[in-house]
Image (cartoon, helix red, strand yellow):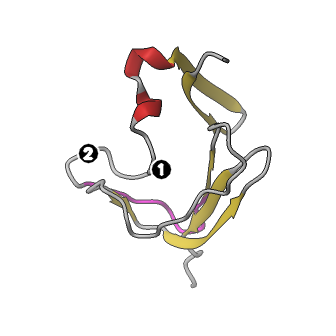
Amino acid sequence: MKARRDSVGFTYGSEAHSSRFPDFVLNISSVWNKAEFNVVGNGGGSRADFNAGSSITAVLYLVDESNFAPTCVPDDGTAGESNNLNLGPCKTSGGANPYIQFTESLSTARR
């Protein structure tokens, strides 16, 4: 059996960052069946405010030894933090590289 590893990664512009640990460190695979991801305020119920014209595309890839597409569950988060962006449609895919993807944006201000 292949050793399980917990990992997280993200990109910002041309920079990529990641961390990996053996699963036994946190044993996340035994209980993790949901993920919440976004760019929000920094704790205490705060809100991240973005400039007009801003756009974020968030993608969460799943490596769980299945080919099932994950399920989008909008407005089911537990974080008290937020942002001022408008949520677009959620897209999912199964197969060899299952993922969830959504885009949030703030329209350019009209003058």
Assess disc 1: are there few (<14), some (14-19) or many (≥20) residues with their C-alpha within 10 Å of its C-alpha. Answer: few
Q: Which mark is residue 79?
A: none
Asked if residue 28 lies left or right of residue 54, the reply is left
Mark 2 sits on what residue? 43
Residues shaded magenta: 46-56
Mark 2 or 1, nearer chain start: 1
Secondary element type, mark 2 = loop
Mark 1 sits on what residue? 37
Residue at 42% in and 32% down:
30
Residue at 43% in and 40% down:
32
Across and down, in percent, residue 63 comes to 65, 37
- 45 shown above or below 72: above
**Is 63 or 67 nearer to us in this picture?**
67
Residue at 57% in and 84% down:
110
Across and down, in percent, residue 92 comes to 67, 61
From the viewer's perspective, is the residue at label 2 or at label 1 nearer?
1
Q: Amino acid at mark 2?
A: Gly
Total label count? 2
Q: Amino acid at mark 1?
A: Phe
Gap in angstroms between the C-alphas marked 2 and 1: 14 Å
Secondary element type, mark 1 = loop
Is residue 51 covered in magenta?
A: yes
Residue at the farthest right position: 96
Asked if residue 72 lies left or right of residue 101, the reply is left
